[in-house]
């Protein structure tokens, strides 16, 4: 499968929001993704296959660190290494913008995501009890430090 990793465009928002809705119990709206596509302090990437959005991931960039958000792949395309291609590119582009430390929260039961993050240099440094709802669950706080 050919995959192109590119910057998210405003016109990608509906497709990205659809993947978000299939992937998370409290999904972001289409409007939220439109806003992220236009923000200077945000970097969102999409994975495109056959001219369709296959996945997305993003960063909100602060003065010293960035928070990773919305790492998701269309359920029909999971297990094909798409997230494993998007995340390193997101981190690389974040580093090009001067980011040295990255953080994220992940459901404590999401073994596939935790493995992906660990493979990309993240380590668990804390827990946010009952951070998620639907179902209620703790979040692991992971960091990748300079």
Image (cartoon, rainbow, N blue to C red):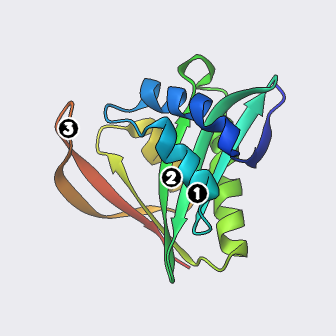
Pick the residue in front: 115 or 40: 40
SS of the residue under disc 3: loop
Q: Residue at x 37, y 38 (%)?
A: 110
Pick the residue in front: 135 or 62: 62
Image quarter in which the N terminus is found: top right
Percent coordinates x, y for residue 126 in the rendering: 26, 64
Instruction: Return the residue at label 1.
Output: 120
Pick the residue in front: 139 or 112: 139
Instruction: Return the residue at label 2.
Output: 117
Image quarter in which the C terminus is found: bottom right
Instruction: Return the residue at label 3.
Output: 133
Q: Residue at x 38, y 35 (%)?
A: 27
- Of circles 3 and 2, the one toward us is 3
**Residues under labels 1 and 2: Cα distance?**
5 Å
Other residues around mark 1 within 10 Å, as few (<14) / some (14–19) / many (≥20):
some
Q: Does 98 sit above or below residue 61?
A: below
> Is 18 on the left-hand or right-hand side of 88?
left
> Is 60 on the left-hand or right-hand side of 105?
right
């Amino acid at each position: 499968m050919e995959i192109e990793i590119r910057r998210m465009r405003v016109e990608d928002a509906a497709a990205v929001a659809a993947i978000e809705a299939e992937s998370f119990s409290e999904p972001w709206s289409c409007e939220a993704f439109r806003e992220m596509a236009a923000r200077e302090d945000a970097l969102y990437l999409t994975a495109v296959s056959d001219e369709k959005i296959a996945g997305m991931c993003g960063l909100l960039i602060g003065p010293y660190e960035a928070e990773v958000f919305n790492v998701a792949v269309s359920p029909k395309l999971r297990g094909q290494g798409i997230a494993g291609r998007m995340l390193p590119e997101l981190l690389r582009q974040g580093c090009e913008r001067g980011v040295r430390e990255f953080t994220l929260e992940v459901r404590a039961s999401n073994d596939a995501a935790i493995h992906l993050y660990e493979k990309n240099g993240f380590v668990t440094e804390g827990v946010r009890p009952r951070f998620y709802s639907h179902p209620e669950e703790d979040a692991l706080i992971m960091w990748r430090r300079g």
